[in-house]
Image (cartoon, rainbow, N blue to C red):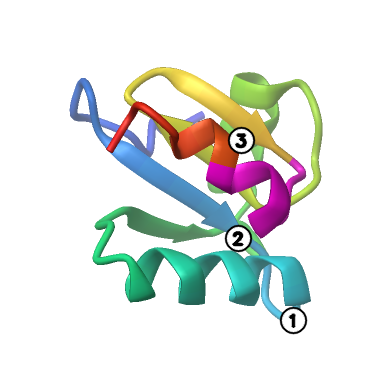
Amino acid sequence: MAKISLMENERILYVKNGCPWCVEVEEYLAEKGIAVRRVVVSGNRDAMEEMVALSGQSKAPTLDWDGEVLADFGVDELVPFLNGRI
């Protein structure tokens, strides 16, 4: 399996095409000026395998925030997760 994330302490948002929670989270992050590397797992087996290995599940969005993982979430879960991190 190819490793998608090559940089340590990189913020990666794994998303699926057509996922309304993914769109909501991406819009929130953009609104707040929070930069992440977006990785689409739909149709990308390597990226999907990496997300599953990272989070233990296959649901999106999944966020790798400098090694801390938030999986299968919406903005309501993201806001407290980001508290103290930004």
Is residue 71 inside the magenta stretch? no
Is residue 73 inside the magenta stretch? yes
Residue 53 x %, y %: 64, 21
Q: Is residue 18 left or right of residue 44?
A: right
Q: Which mark is residue 7?
A: none
Does residue 86 show up?
A: yes
Residue 57 x %, y %: 81, 30
- Closer-to-camera residue (46/8): 8
Residue 82 x %, y %: 45, 37
Question: How far is disc 1 from disc 2 in space, using C-alphas?
Answer: 9 Å
The residue singled out by tag 1 in the image is 18
**Where are the magenta residues, as a range?**
72-79
The residue singled out by tag 3 in the image is 51
Vertically, is 78 above or below 8? below
Please name the amino acid that badge 1 sits on.
Gly
Q: Which residue is pictured at 57% across the width and 36% down the height? A: 80
Q: Quick one: label 3 or label 1, which is nearer the N terminus? A: 1
Residue 31 x %, y %: 36, 75
The residue singled out by tag 2 in the image is 15
Quadrant of the image occupied by residue 69: top right
Q: Which residue is pictured at 52% across the width and 40% down the height? A: 63
- Count neighbours of disc 3 (C-alpha within 10 A) and say few if under 14, some if 14 to 19, many if 20 or more: many
Q: Which residue is pictured at 32% across the width and 34% down the height? A: 5
Q: Secondary structure at mark 1?
A: loop
